Image (spheres, grey):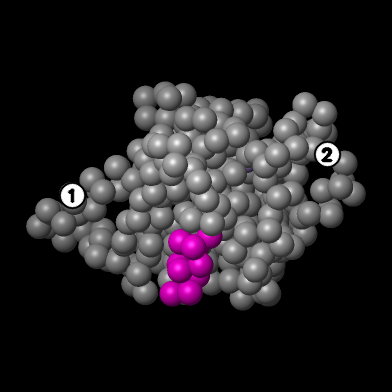
Amino acid sequence: MKTSLIVFPFDLFGSSGAGAGAALIADEFREILADNRRESAPTRAQAYTDQVRLKEFTFDTVESYAGWREQGRRAVRQALRTGDLFYWIAGNHLGVLPVYDELAAQSEGALVVQFDAHLDIHQFRDCATEPSHGNFLLHCAGPLPRLVNVGHRELLLPADYVARHYHETFPATELAVDAAPAVKRLRAACETADRVFLDLDCDVFDPAYFPAVSQPVPFGLSPLLFLRLLEAVWSPKVAGVFVSEFDPARDRDDRSLALVMWLMEYLLLRKYEV
Ligand SMILES: [Mn+2]
């Protein structure tokens, strides 16, 4: 079982600058893999180093944007067909839409656990009606897969509207009071799913821990609380991990970069270490 690391630095229509984040993650990852290969002392990293394949898209010409969604869908389709774990490293959250398009086409039994400060179903007066990083779920090519949000801090969207799109949501306010019920319900939801996908929008973290986002929202998750929730969700059923909204120009002392790289390495160890 190999892991494809697909870098898809799309960042039009919201959080321009997040594309550079995806490219930076790719660079860092190449460096980590090269370092691992050079190391002669035994390390834990040997468990995954030869299991990772990197595939990088670039969006540096006008032409490269043509058919971006279909290009993305093709790559996702291929990753889903092999059945291996894949990482989808997007620029902004809209760059994850091709994954949702494909999951919609074959969503039976799939559960997406979305860690995100926002519920991306915005349709306010000042929001674009065209697909953007704040409304992309409304533009999915088919019915959304079963969707659970963890850690949102929405103060505008009415519950009945949210319930039309999300199976369940666990706002940060609820997690702050007591995370135990969420841990239990997340674990139960994952148990009944055939395949689980983790969709991490980096703004789920508190800006104190992860400053490198373009839409910071206060009262976010601490990395430790995130790990506790991740633990509830993680199992061999996890078939995809999506990362988006990392904008390195807003980072402080590479704090956010360190967090995202640590997390990706940790998840590879979770998968390959025996
Ligand atoms: Mn989002």
| Coordinates of residue 48 in the picture (x, y in percent) | 29, 63
Crowding at mark 2 (Cα within 10 Å: few <14, some 14-19, many 20+): some
Residue at the spot 61% in from the left edge and 29% down from the top edge: 215
In terms of sequence position, does the residue under pointer 2 or pointer 1 come before the other?
1
Quadrant where ligand 1 appears = top right
Please check the rendered image and state whether residue 131 is part of the magenta-colored stretch, yes or no: no
79 drawn magenta:
yes
- Classify the position of the C terminus by image quarter: bottom left
Residue 236 can be seen in this image? no
Q: Magenta stretch? A: 73-82
Front in this rendered view, residue 7 or 46: 7
Determine the image quadrant of residue 261.
top left
Q: Point out which mark residue 35 bears.
A: 1
The answer to whether residue 76 is left or right of residue 194 is left
Name the element at disc 2.
Answer: loop
Mark 2, residue position: 157
Q: Position of residue 61 (x, y in %)?
A: 40, 37
